[in-house]
Every structure is written in structure tokens, then in C-alpha cells.
């Protein structure tokens, strides 16, 4: 039988017993190894032995990105520096980057659970995995490659961009899987179609990381390339890197690796658990991480837990796709709006493409105004733009209870990106 990277828990009870034992270890390890964690626990009067059940996790103090930045260059380090074998850094744009350290065991764990992603996507060792994400100090490229090699498939480490080389390798190496951002996936699908390569490639699956992929974008990519499956793969530098979960071929939600971290969904304002099934901020606590354990780390990513088990039969729990980030929220005319909500509303309109931009300006009258730029679908008739404009404005009004001015552009006229697409342009004074 082929090697499996799935855990062997027979039921949820066994998984929870594993979580509790690993949570106790993590708290002891962080308390004894990290001055920051020890001080934070002492400040709330907590000792490691106070953690006796999974519910006790709520007694632990929260950790934020500021805690990582303030400990630069080796924040939250809980092992001697001599045990550190690698560093990675976040792609933050303000101030010092968040640098995360890894022990050899951390890298082994990362490789194994990333290989689990490929297994869940039903790859085989015969697959050829073209990796079109960033290499270097970032976790993306090396993470995808690490997991691919541990799984046993062929890694094709092209890196981001370079569309000519991407197309060349898709044809010459007959790559069957492409790992990239959703924006890059759309760019490649349109480029393969434009160059007439569709019948010359063997691509069957795409794995999207780093940004939310809208239903409309996935539909467009799937239509152009005839893919069997497209998967969302979450992850962040603080939590090893990409590969911390994947939606299986049933696509009912993202299975997350609950044997490696505990996921809480909290209200970002009250920091209390949200009711089951409601959207909140992902807060993660690692269970095995040695160099930089995370204790109740606020990721700022928004999603919801899916209460029912997946029909695939795997007992690993589910969370929904990432809606956005709590710090990406737009306050427009006293309404809290996340870009993912606009994305969802637009995905239900047949006559538009997958690309859009949100522009917010403040008028001379002191009021805020939203312009929504969209593309017409390639099959839409030229004289339908006025009708499409009305559809978009009505959909946004119904979904968000705010008004916008829709601008409808010709198909293919809006910019494509090899990395993440910039969607929000807020031009209001700070």
C-alpha cells in the first residue's frame, strides 16, 4: 500500500486526547523556554499545571503579531539558538519583518503534514507538480517543494512569474499539478488558451495558496483548462508556512490538521468564541512546534468552523474558506464590509468576469463613495453593459445594504497579476 500521511485516530475522542496531551506539553515548553510566554502567563496568574482540559485553553493569554515584532529578530524563541536549523520571514510591508525559527523536528513535521495535503488532493507519485510561488526567505516555494518531495511526486520548482517558462514546462514536462496564487492561476489559464496550448498540456489540478479564490475565478479557470479539481491551501509563516489544511475532492470545506494545532474562532472585537457556524477570527495554538510555539495566536484571518463531518469520511475537522482578514475590513457609511462579501455577491452574476476592483473616495460633500469596477464576461454582448451595471449595483445593495457605482469594462481589460491581485483602493484621508 502507498504510504499515508494521515493520522491514525479512530474517532474524535482519540484526536481530542492527543490534543490535550500536546497542549499540556506546548504550555510547559513555552513557559520554560520563552521569557515572553512565561511573563504573559504569570501576568494572568497561570501555571502550566493549570491546563487540565481542552476548555482550559481559554485561560491562556492571546498572542499577537506585535509580540512577534517586538521580539525581533528571534521572537518567542523557546529553544537554544543552537537547535535552530532554518529561518523564514513574513512578507510584511511595514516595519521589521516577522522572522520565525525552525528546529529539525519542526521541518520534519511541516514536510509530513504538507505531504498530507498532496495525499488529500489524491495525487500519486506519478504526478508532476509545477511550483509557481515565491522562493527565498518566504515559506511558500520551499514549503510546496518540501511536501512534494516527502510525498514522492516530482517537484518542478519554477517559482513565480515567468509565463514563458511556465508554459514551456507545462508542455515539455507535462506537469499535472500547478501550485500558485489564484491570480496566477487565472493568468496561466488565459495565457494557455491565448497560445492555443490547451490540447498540448496534461494539467489536471491546481492548488491555490496565499489569496482567496472567488467562485467566479475558479469557474473561469476550470472552463478554460478543463481541470478535474482546484484546491485551497491555507497557511502562514507563523504557523510553519503553507500546508496547514486542504479541501478534499468533495470540496465541502478545508480539512485542517487538528493534530498539529488547535483552532478557535473568536469574535475579533470581544475575543470571545462565536456561536457554532458563525464567522470570526482564526486563533491558533500549536501542539508540536518547538522553536516558536504559538499560544492563542491571533491570525486576523476570518472564517467559520463547519460543524458537520465531511462526506469523504475523514475525521479531521473542517473550516470554511478564508473570507478575508479582520484588519482588511472596510468601514463604508457605517457598514462593516469585507472584500470577500463583495467577491461572493459578484460571483453570482453570470454576465461578468472574475476580475474586480473596489475604489472608495471621499467627495467634496464629505460623504464616502464606492466605485466597483468589473469586467463583462467574454460571452456577454457589447450592448448589455448598461444592464450589467444595474445587476451589479442591485446585487451589492441587496447583499451589503450600501450603494455603489458600477463601472463595466470590456473583458480582459483589467490588469492580471502573477502574485496577489490588489482589489481594494481606499483613497480616503487617513
Image (cartoon, helix red, strand yellow):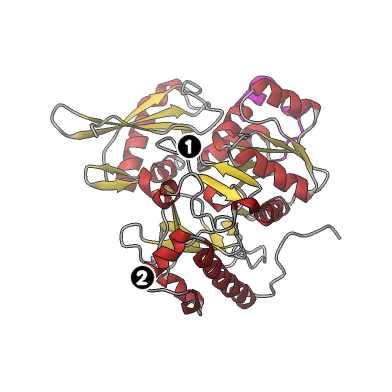
Mark drawn on residue 44:
2
Residue 168: name its quadrant. top right
Q: Nearer the viewer, mark 2 or mark 1?
A: 2
- Left of 273 or right of it: where is 75? right
How many marks the image carries: the answer is: 2
- Left of 117 or right of it: where is 44? left
Q: Which residues are magenta?
A: 189-206
Determine which residue is flagged by label 1.
350
Element at label 1? loop
Residue 179: name its quadrant. top right
CA gap, disc 2 and disc 1: 53 Å
Q: Residue at the right extreme?
A: 1
Residue 272 spot, x, y in % from top left:
36, 66
Quadrant position of the C terminus in the picture: top left
Instruction: Tell me what residue is drawn at x 45 percent, y 43 percent.
Output: 348
Question: Does 258 sit above or below residue 246?
Answer: below
Dot placed on the residue nearer the N-terminal end, 2 or 1: 2
- Asked if the residues shown at circle 2 and circle 1 are in contact, with their CB atoms under 8 angstroms apart, the answer is no
Instruction: Tell me what residue is drawn at x 66 percent, y 65 percent.
Output: 314
Q: Residues within 10 Å of mark 1 (few under 14, many from 20)?
A: some
Amino acid at each position: 500500500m502507498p504510504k499515508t500521511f494521515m493520522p491514525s485516530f479512530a474517532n474524535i475522542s482519540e484526536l481530542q486526547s492527543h490534543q490535550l496531551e500536546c497542549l499540556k506539553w506546548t504550555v510547559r515548553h513555552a513557559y520554560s523556554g520563552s521569557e515572553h510566554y512565561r511573563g504573559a502567563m504569570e501576568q494572568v496568574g497561570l501555571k502550566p499545571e493549570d491546563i487540565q482540559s481542552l476548555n482550559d485553553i481559554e485561560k491562556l493569554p492571546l498572542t499577537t503579531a506585535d509580540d512577534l515584532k517586538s521580539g525581533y529578530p528571534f521572537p518567542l524563541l523557546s529553544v537554544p539558538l543552537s537547535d535552530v536549523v532554518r529561518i523564514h520571514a513574513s512578507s510584511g510591508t511595514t516595519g521589521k519583518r516577522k522572522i520565525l525559527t525552525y528546529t529539525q523536528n519542526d521541518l520534519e513535521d511541516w514536510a509530513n503534514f504538507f505531504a498530507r495535503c498532496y495525499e488529500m488532493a489524491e495525487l500519486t507519485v506519478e504526478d508532476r507538480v509545477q511550483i509557481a510561488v515565491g522562493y527565498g526567505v518566504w515559506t511558500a516555494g520551499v514549503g510546496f517543494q518540501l511536501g512534494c518531495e516527502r510525498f514522492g511526486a516530482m517537484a518542478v520548482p519554477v517559482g513565480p512569474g515567468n509565463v514563458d517558462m511556465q508554459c514551456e514546462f507545462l508542455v515539455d514536462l507535462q506537469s499535472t499539478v500547478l501550485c500558485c496564487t489564484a491570480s496566477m492561476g487565472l493568468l496561466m489559464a488565459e495565457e494557455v488558451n491565448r497560445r492555443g496550448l490547451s490540447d498540448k498540456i496534461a494539467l489536471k489540478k491546481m492548488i491555490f495558496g496565499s489569496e482567496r479564490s472567488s467562485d467566479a475565478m475558479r469557474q473561469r479557470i476550470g472552463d478554460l483548462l478543463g481541470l478535474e479539481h482546484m484546491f485551497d491551501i491555507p497557511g502562514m509563516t507563523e504557523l510553519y508556512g503553507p500546508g496547514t489544511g486542504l479541501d478534499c475532492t468533495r470540496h465541502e470545506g478545508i480539512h485542517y490538521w487538528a493534530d498539529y494545532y488547535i483552532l478557535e474562532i473568536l469574535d475579533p472585537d470581544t475575543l470571545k468564541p462565536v456561536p457554532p457556524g458563525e464567522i470570526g477570527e482564526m486563533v491558533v495554538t500549536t501542539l508540536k512546534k518547538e522553536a516558536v510555539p504559538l499560544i492563542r495566536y491571533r491570525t486576523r484571518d476570518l472564517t467559520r468552523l463547519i460543524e458537520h463531518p465531511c462526506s469523504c469520511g475523514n475525521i479531521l475537522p473542517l473550516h470554511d474558506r478564508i473570507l478575508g482578514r479582520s484588519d482588511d475590513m472596510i468601514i463604508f457609511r457605517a457598514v462593516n464590509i469585507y472584500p470577500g462579501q463583495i467577491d461572493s455577491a459578484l460571483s453570482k452574476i453570470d454576465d461578468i468576469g472574475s476580475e474586480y476592483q473596489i475604489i472608495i473616495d471621499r467627495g467634496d460633500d464629505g460623504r464616502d463613495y464606492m466605485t466597483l469596477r468589473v469586467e463583462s464576461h467574454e460571452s456577454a454582448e457589447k450592448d448589455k453593459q448598461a444592464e450589467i451595471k444595474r445587476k451589479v449595483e442591485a446585487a451589492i445593495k441587496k447583499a451589503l445594504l450600501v450603494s455603489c457605482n458600477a463601472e463595466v469594462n470590456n473583458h480582459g481589460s483589467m490588469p492580471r497579476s502573477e502574485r496577489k491581485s490588489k482589489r481594494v483602493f481606499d483613497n480616503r484621508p487617513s
